[in-house]
Image (tube, rainbow, N blue to C red):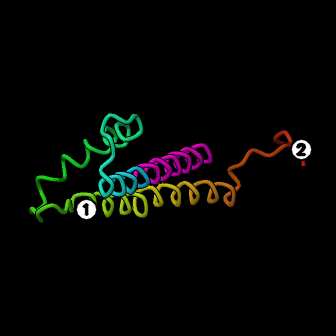
Amino acid sequence: MILLGNFLMAVGQLLSSLVTLFIFLLIARAILSWVNPDPSNFIVRIINDTTEPLMARVRPMIPNFGMLDMSIIVVLFGLYFLQAFIAQSMVDYGYLLKHSSVSNGVLPSSQPVGIH
């Protein structure tokens, strides 16, 4: 159970880190949309190419507000939910598995069986 607990904690923390990185990319995209940067810039292309697949899936589901793209707000809320609910639940459940195994005496002792 300790290995499963550690695995769940690691996957949850990795997922949380990836979501945080994606949130920063979305914020950078929103800021870049205010200044109208050169689309051939390498960093601008990376930010747009990374965030556009998710934005394109959400955009048709949201009513049109003129020049204001509300899909970024919906995506940000979705990512915050993913981070706060799913990733944190994985970390918490892994922690619970790990520490319940320790408290139940599942850890192997350093002494051979039969020697007390």
Mark whose residue sits in front, 2 or 1: 1
Q: Quadrant of residue 101?
A: bottom right
Residue type pointed to by label 1: Val
Q: Position of residue 114 (x, y in %)?
A: 85, 43
Q: Residues within 10 Å of mark 1 (few under 14, many from 20)?
A: some
Q: Secondary structure at mark 1?
A: helix
Per the model, the C-alpha gap separating discs 2 and 1 is 61 Å
Q: Is residue 16 above or below residue 43?
A: below
Q: Is residue 16 above or below residue 46?
A: below
- The label shown at residue 74 is 1
Write down the residue under mark 2: 115
Residue type pointed to by label 2: Ile
User: Is 73 inside the magenta-drawn segment?
Assistant: no
Residue visible at 53% across and 61% down in the picture: 92
Q: Which residues are magenta?
A: 1-22
Q: Position of residue 90 (x, y in %)?
A: 47, 55
Instruction: Determine whether, in the image, residue 20 is placed left or right of residue 31.
Output: right
Instruction: Determine whether, in the image, residue 48 is placed left or right of residue 90.
Output: left
Q: Nearer the viewer, residue 50 or 4?
A: 50
